[in-house]
Image (cartoon, rainbow, N blue to C red):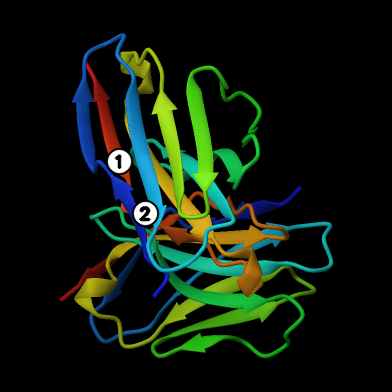
Amino acid sequence: AQTVTQSQPEMSVQEAETVTLSCTYDTSESDYYLFWYKQPPSRQMILVIRQEAYKQQNATENRFSVNFQKAAKSFSLKISDSQLGDAAMYFCAANSGYALNFGKGTSLLVTP
Amino acid sequence: GAVVSQHPSRVICKSGTSVKIECRSLDFQATTMFWYRQFPKQSLMLMATSNEGSKATYEQGVEKDKFLINHASLTLSTLTVTSAHPEDSSFYICSATDRGSGAYIQYFGAGTRLSVL
């Protein structure tokens, strides 16, 4: 079984600044994947970034990057040059098969 | 690519009626589909996993007879909420994955807001 913990219910960042969202997980699996999904007010779940656990290199997608610390079971998301459109709920998730285990989410507010 | 269509986006029904929600993968073969339920300001809760051509696997606490899932083809899964009651009102989201890609990525539909009067 896997558990995913997001300890920040809400975060706020100013436009153009950088923000980091925290996520820790617990798993007994040796092979697994980690994800960050974004859910804007439309409630459409959007994949932001994905990390394979066997890869040491941190994944990067444009302004989004992760800090994957496997030993510490930590998987934080860094958003650089924040934009108003980044405002959303962000969910960290883990899977080892095909089912996803989600954290409780972090609500990100972006202020002008 | 990797588009999942979910229909309807919103449904209002009377208590006691049944409601069917469709989830289609438009540009890939969805060997596995998932159904989630999401309450306001909460995370997604997995209800069941369905593989094409076989019975769905339900999570603990989810009533199989209340939430009927059919995955008859590689592009379509349906969730039927039978004899809906006000407590079934919620946001239902489907997702699909292509096992053949090996990517373990789930692509989500836009969700269905169910309101039972």
Residue A102 can be seen, yes or no: no
Query: Could one spot residue A38 in this view of the protein?
Result: yes
State the mark number for residue B112: 1
Tell me the crowding category of disc 1: few under 14, some 14 to 19, or many 20 or more residues within 10 angstroms, Cα based. many
Given the image, on which type of amino acid does mark 1 rest? Thr
- The residue tagged 2 is B109
- Residue B76 at x, y percent in the picture: 44, 48
- Decide: is A105 above or below B107: above
Q: CA distance from mark 1 to mark 2?
A: 9 Å
Tags 1 and 2 touching, CB below 8 Å: yes
Percent x, y for residue B75?
46, 54
Between A41 and B78, the one lying in front of the other is B78
Characterize the local packing of mark 2: few (<14), some (14-19) or many (20 or more) Cα atoms within 10 angstroms. many
Residue drawn 42% across and 42% down?
B42
Chain of the residue that carries numbered disc 2 in the rendered image: B
Examine the rendered structure and indicate whether residue A20 appears above or below residue B113: below
The lab-note entry on whether marks 1 and 2 share a chain reads yes
| Image side of residue B58 versus residue B68, left or right | right
On-image quarter of the N terminus of chain B: bottom left
Q: Which chain is mark 1 on?
A: B
Residue located 37% across and 12% down the image: B83
**Could you tell me the amino acid type at mark 2?**
Gly
Which residue occupies the foreground of this view, A24 or B68? B68
Q: Secondary structure at mark 2?
A: loop
Helix, strand or loop at disc 1? strand
When the figure is inspected, residue B114 is found, relative to residue B52, above or below; the finding is above
Image spot of residue B107 (x, y percent): 46, 62
Using the rendered view, name the quadrant where residue B54 is placed: top right
Image quadrant in which you'd find residue B85: top left
